[in-house]
Image (cartoon, rainbow, N blue to C red):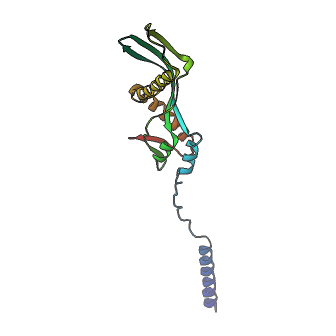
Amino acid sequence: MKKIIIIIMSLLLIAMLLREHNKSPTPQPAEMHLPQFTIDRAMVIKSLSSSSQIVGLSATVTKEYKYIDNKFYGHREYHYTAVCYLKLGYDVEDVIKNISISGTTIVIHKPEVKLISMDIPMNEISVERNVGLLRSELSFEDQQGIYEFMRVNAKTDVMHDEKLLSETRLKTNKAVESLLMAIPNVKRVEWVQ
């Protein structure tokens, strides 16, 4: 009888120990999950879309033009000095369509520099005239034609001035980078050709 009681007590003790063991399993090491940071393309677009252009350079340049009309009965010479006010930069649509996102880096294929605005105020054009006795002054329509020629020529000169374009790229890239670096999780902005 004593043996039976000892066996029953032993079985009860084993059952209680097994039950306690099942209640508190040994803790397993937790898996490490590092948060995945992603950059939302919509946030990038919204950040850039606050304006339609990003101006990188505002400049004032002086351009000179000559109009010479010599005939056998006299001559007309006009020397124009014009002040041009320029704004150069990027069109936002060109920047947005050239963006790709790689992790926490925004990669931008460099867009073309655009002439955002150019103003040649008529009241800031100085004119030196040398008109022969038998020649008349230029008509208003002729002067308007020369003014339009000056605008087109100034635009062409500016868009071929590598010094201006290089300075514009540098300053506009910095402006775009400052807008994009304000977006959460952006660590780097990379410019590629």
Q: Residue pushed farthest bottom?
A: 1
What residue do we see at 60% from left, 83% from top?
10
Looking at the picture, how far across and down is residue 118, in whole percent? 51, 28
Q: Relative to residue 59, is residue 52 depicted above or below?
A: below
Image position, residue 169 (x, y; %): 45, 32
- Residue 144, position as x, y percentages in the image: 51, 24
Residue 171 in sight here: yes
Nearer-the-camera pick, 74 or 58: 74
Looking at the image, how many numbered discs can be counted on the residues? 0
Above or below residue 77? Residue 46 is: below
**Quarter where residue 160 is shown:** top left
Q: Give 153 or 9, whichever is nearer the viewer.
A: 153
Residue 58 as seen in the image, left or right of residue 16: left
The image quadrant of residue 152 is top left
Q: Position of residue 141 (x, y in %)?
A: 51, 24
Residue at the extreme top of the image, as rendered: 133
Assign the C terminus to one quadrant of the image: top left
Residue occupying the point 64% across, 88% down: 5
Who is closer to the viewer here, 181 or 55? 55
Could one spot residue 40 in this view of the protein?
Answer: no
Q: Nearer the viewer, residue 17 or 65?
A: 65
Q: Is residue 117 above or below residue 74?
A: below
Q: Which quadrant is the N terminus positioned in?
A: bottom right
Judged left or right of residue 116, residue 158 is: left
Residue shown at 59%/80% (left/top)? 14
**At x 44% / y 12%, what residue is drawn?**
135
Vertical arrangement, residue 129 with respect to residue 113, above or below: above
